[in-house]
Amino acid sequence: MSTTADHTPTPEPAKDNSVNTPNPLPEKTNPETEDRPDGRVVNGNVVEFKPGTARTPEEIPTPRETSPVYAATGDTEPVDAEVVEESEPATSTVKVDPPEVKKSWWETVADAKARPLVASWLLSAEEFKSRAKFLVQLAGHQTAFHALRVPVYVPSAIVKAPGALRRGTVRVHRWVYDAESKPVRMNARDRNDQDAYLKLLAVRNETVRRRIAPVMVGLLVLIAIVYLAITYVTPFWNWTCLVLAMTLVGWFGAPKDKPVAGRAVDQSKTPKMTSAMVEDALSSLGIGALNQAIAKGKRIEFPSPIARDGDGWRADVNLPSGVPAGDVIAKRQELSSALRRQIGCVWPEGDAKVHEGRLVLWVGDKDMSKSTQKPWPLAKPGVTVDLFKPQPFGTDQRGRWVDVTLMFVSVIIGAVPRMGKTVTLRELLLMAALDPRAVLYSYDLKGTGDLSPLAPCSHAYGVGDEAEDVERMLAEMRELREEMRRRTKVIRGLPESVCPDNKVTPELAARKDLRLAPIVVGVDECQVWFEHDKYGAEFEEICVDLAKRGPALGIILILATQRPDAKSLPTGISANAILRYCLKVQGHTENDMVLGTGQHKAGVRATMFARSDRGIGYLVGEGDDAKIVRSVYKDATDAKKIAAGARARREALGNITGYAAGVEIDLDAARLDTLADVLSVFEKGEEKLWSDVIVSRLAELRPSTYGKWTPAALATALKPDGVKPGQVWATDPESGKGSNRNGYTRDALTKAKSNRA
C-alpha cells in the first residue's frame, strides 16, 4: 500500500480472532511505544495498562509515533515517503546485567588477602616452645644414641678404611690422568681423525701436567709429616693419630649404602600434598554435582597456596558452584582412601564465613587418635583452676590446646557408646574440682563407678539407677532448686555497685557470707532420669529450670547421654545449652540434638567420625566456629591422683561438705509423704485451706523438713500426685474474715491419694 504524507491513515478496528481466519500480518511496532504486559510508554513515561480497560486518547499510538519514517528521521514535519510493511516486528533488548566497572588499583589491593609475614609457629609462644623443646630432645637423643655405639663405630670405620683408601686412590688417579676425556680420544682414533685425536691428546697432556704437580706436592708433604712424626713424636700419639686418621677415612669413605653409623630416628616422611592430588581425590568421591560441574569445565579453585600447617598440610578449596562442603565432609572415609592416608589424618571442614562451597582440608602426618597428646597442663601437681577463666580442654588436629569456659553455660555431651563420652565428663568434673570454691554434684547413672574418683570432692555423689539411688538424687536436686531460688533473692538484694549485671562474679563467688560459689552438676547417662516412669517429669522440670536460670546464678549443668533424642534429652535443655561436645553419632537428627539445629546442614557433622576416633568430637559454643577437638584421656588412677590434690586444697580452705564430709541426705525425711502430711493438717470441719496456712502448719508438724518451705515448694511437691493449687474461699483463723486465695481442698487431696492405688 502506498500513501502520501498529507493523508493520515486511521487505525484499523480490532479484529476478532475467535474464528478461524488466516493469521494477519504482524503489526508495525516501535520499541519505544509497543504494548507491554504491564503498561505502555506514552511520551517517554510508562502508563499502567490493564487488559480489558478502555484507553485514553493519550494512550492510543498515533501514526507519527508508529511510523518508521518519523522514527528514523526524527522530523516533526511530514515528508513524501512510502510506508513499507515489515515482515517481522521490531524487537527490543533490555540489559539486566549491571555494567562492568573496572576496579581501581586501590580496590584490588584492599580485596587482597595478605599472607602472614612469618610462619605461624613463630607468633605462638606455646608452639615455638614446643618446637624448640622437640629439637633439643631430638639432639639429645641422637647424641646419646651415637655415643653408646662409639665402641662399635671405631672398629667398623678402621675396617672400612683400606677400602676407602683404595677407592680414594683410584679417584685421584683417574682425575690426574683425565680419564673422563679418554672416550672422546678413542672415538677420534676409531674414526681415523688424526687432527682431532692429536688436538685432544695435547689438551690431555697439558691437563695431566697441571694436575700432577699439586698431587706430588701433597704426597711429599704427607711423607714429611709421617717421617717427622716417627722421628720426634712419642709412639702413643703416633698410634692415636693413626687410629684417628683411619677412623676418619673409614667414616667418610664408606660406601653410601653401607655407612658406619646408623640412623638414630626412623623418619616416615609423608608425601607432599599437591593441587593435583586434591583434585583427583575429590573427583573420585562419586559426588554427582561435583562430577557434573567438572565435566562442564568448572574447575576446583585454590584461593591460597597449599602449605604446611602444624604437623600437616592445609588446602583451602573453592568447590564448583552448587557443591556444598558438607557433601565432601560426609564422604570422609572415601576421601581418606583417595588420598591414600589413614582416616585419622584426613579432616575436611567447611568455612561458612566465606561461603558454603569453601572446603578446608587438613591432612596430618599422623593419625590424630594415635598420636601422642601433649600433657594436660591441669594435671600438674599444685595447679588451681578458676572456672571463670578459660581452661585447656583438649587439642585440635594440629596439636594446639583448645580452651573452654564453664561458667555461665550449660553443657551437653553426646555420643554412641564407647567413644569417650564418660571420660570427657570426668575431665570436666576434674576441672571443676580443681577450683577449691566449686561445689560438685557427681552422678553416675551407668553404675560402673567411672565418676568415683570425684567422690572425695563431691558435695553430692550417686551411682546406679536403683530406686533408692534415684530417690536420693531427686531429693538432692530438689535441694539444689531451692538453692537456686535462694541465690536469686541474694543477687536481687545486692546493690548495683556490687552486682551490676545481676549475675555471679568472681568477687561474689569468693565471699563466703553470700554462698555464691560455682555449683557444677555432672550427670552421666542422663536419659535414666528423664525416662524414669515415676520421677522423670520432675527431673525434667528441675533440669530445664537449671539450664535456663542456673548459668547466671553460678550453676553449671553438664549432661552426657548415649541416646541424644527428644525423650532422652528434653528440648527445653538442648535449646538452652550453650557449650556442646558431640563425639560420633549415627544420624543427622542426633547430630543436631547435641550440636544445635542446622549444624549438620552447615557441614558440622559428627557422623563423619570413625569408630577409631575415640575421644574426638566437635566442640560448639566456645567461640564462633565449631572445632574438632580431642579431649584429654585420664584413666581412673590418674583421675584419683588429680582429685586427691584437689581435695587437699579444699581441706586447706575448709570447703569439704556433704558427701565428701561424710554427710548424706536423710532419705527417710525425703521419703515423707507430703500429700498425707498436707491432709493431716486439715482440722475437723475444714474443707479448704490456703497454701500459706498449709505451709505454716507443715513447718510446725516437721520443722526440719518443712521449716523453709514456701507455697511454691508445696505446689511442686504435690504436682506428681496431680494436685494443683487454685482459688479457694476460706476464713482467716485470726481475723475470722473470709477471702479468695490460692489453696487446696480436702476433696481434691483425698481423691489424689486414693488414685495412687
Image (spheres, rainbow, N blue to C red):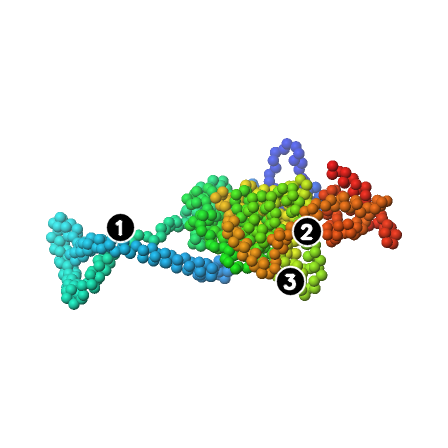
Q: Which residue is mark 3?
A: 511
Name the image quarter holding the C terminus. top right
Q: Which residue is mark 1?
A: 258
Residue at horizontal 47 percent and vertical 48 percent from the top: 369
For the residues carrying marks 1 and 3, which lies nearer the camera in this image?
3
Label placed on residue 204:
none
Q: CA distance from mark 1 to mark 3?
A: 72 Å
Residue 219 left/right relative to 304: left
Of residues 461 and 503, the one nearer the viewer is 461
Q: Position of residue 644 (x, y in %)?
A: 54, 55
- Helix, strand or loop at label 2? It is helix
> What amino acid is found at the position of numbered circle 3 in the picture?
Arg
Name the image quarter holding the N terminus. top right
- Helix, strand or loop at label 3? It is loop
Q: Position of residue 276 (x, y in %)?
A: 41, 47
Q: Residue furthest front?
A: 662
Q: Can residue 222 be seen by looking at this rendering? A: yes
Label 3 near label 1: C-beta < 8 Å?
A: no
Q: Residue furthest bottom?
A: 232
The residue carrying pointer 1 sits among few (fewer than 14), some (14 to 19) or many (20 or more) residues within 10 Å by Cα, namely few
As displayed, is residue 422 above or below residue 552? above
Q: CA distance from mark 2 to mark 3?
A: 21 Å
Between discs 1 and 3, the one toward the N terminus: 1
Label 3 near label 2: C-beta < 8 Å?
A: no
The residue carrying pointer 3 sits among few (fewer than 14), some (14 to 19) or many (20 or more) residues within 10 Å by Cα, namely few
Q: Which residue is mark 2?
A: 479
The residue carrying pointer 2 sits among few (fewer than 14), some (14 to 19) or many (20 or more) residues within 10 Å by Cα, namely few
Residue at horizontal 77 percent and vertical 50 percent from the top: 701
- Helix, strand or loop at label 1? It is loop
